[in-house]
Amino acid sequence: MTQAIQEQIIFGKDVELITITGLDGVITYTNDAYHKDLGYQSNDLVGIKAAELDHLDMPKSAASNFKSKKKHRKSWTAAVKKQHLNDGYYWVKEVITPIYENASVVAYQSVCTALTNIEQDNAERLYAELKENCSILYSWENFYKRFLTYALVSASIFALGLYASFLFSLFFLMPFIIYYCELKKSSTLFETVTGDFEDVTRCIFNKKTVSFQEESTDSSRLTTSATC
């Protein structure tokens, strides 16, 4: 059974989609932009979990990272693909901040604005890679973890070679194995030193050279090189 192709909903760069949620994640308020720009009725979203608006294409690590930020009462910023309840989807830069009252967090405010074409392309590429590789990506994208892995494997082979001399041949092959692994690594989209979802977000919004350029007239895209 083939899945129906969803259409992307586009809204202006100056539009701000604002929601307020309780501590349980249930939406208690939406601003007029949800009605004017997304076609919702005034109370369509009130009473539902904010997480229900997140598209299935979003990597699970995004939700995990948000929960961690929420636990430590910190704001959270990410590129988010949203599911429209009446079909379709839209991409936003979402900033979620805690609302305080008498030094206690009583609610959360979400402010969503449109992504640029460049940011959306970066997000689509990185999130697709995240979903494909799951948590393995974080370990392998982290240079220090790769270096530690190479060192441990080399030391293990050397130690075993003391008891089985034929294993020394594998030890001398390690430089070539490392070279091959780093060559494969260079084809991925970004390098992280923390292994956290924040590195993905920084790459999406701070890429210096990009794979697509925006055109102000018709929003068409031109292919160029892509690195972080």
Image: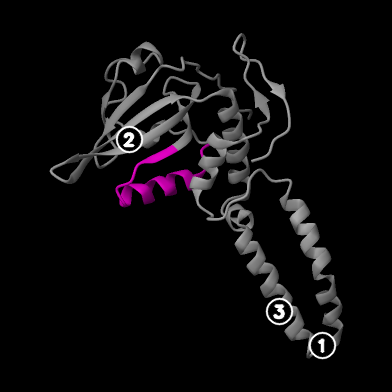
Above or below for 86 versus 82: above
SS state under label 1:
loop
Residue beneath the point at 35% across and 16% down: 33
2 vs 1, front mark: 1
Above or below for 133 versus 228: below
Q: Quarter-wise, where is residue 204 in the image?
A: top right
Q: Quarter-wise, where is residue 106 in the image?
A: top left
The residue closer to the viewer here, 158 or 45, is 158
Residue 70 shown in magenta: yes
Task: Give the farthest residue toward the left.
Answer: 102
- For this view, does 185 lie left or right of residue 138? right
Residue beneath the point at 26% across and 42% down: 24
Tell me where the magenta segment starts and ends, as one range: 57-77
Place of residue 216 in the rendered image (x, y in percent of width and height, measured from the top left): 59, 12
Q: Which mark is residue 49?
A: 2
- For this view, does 202 lie left or right of residue 35? right
Q: Residues within 10 Å of mark 3 (few under 14, many from 20)?
A: few
| Residue type highlighted by circle 1 | Ala
Q: Which residue is mark 3?
A: 155
* Disc with the residue nearer the chain's start (2 vs 1): 2
Place of residue 100 in the rendered image (x, y in percent of width and height, measured from the top left): 20, 40
Q: Which mark is residue 164?
A: 1
Place of residue 183 in the rendered image (x, y in percent of width and height, measured from the top left): 78, 53
Q: Quadrant of the C terminus?
A: top right
Above or below for 198 versus 10: below
Measure how far apart labels 2 and 1 are at the Cα level: 60 Å
2 vs 3, front mark: 3
| Residue type highlighted by circle 2 | Lys
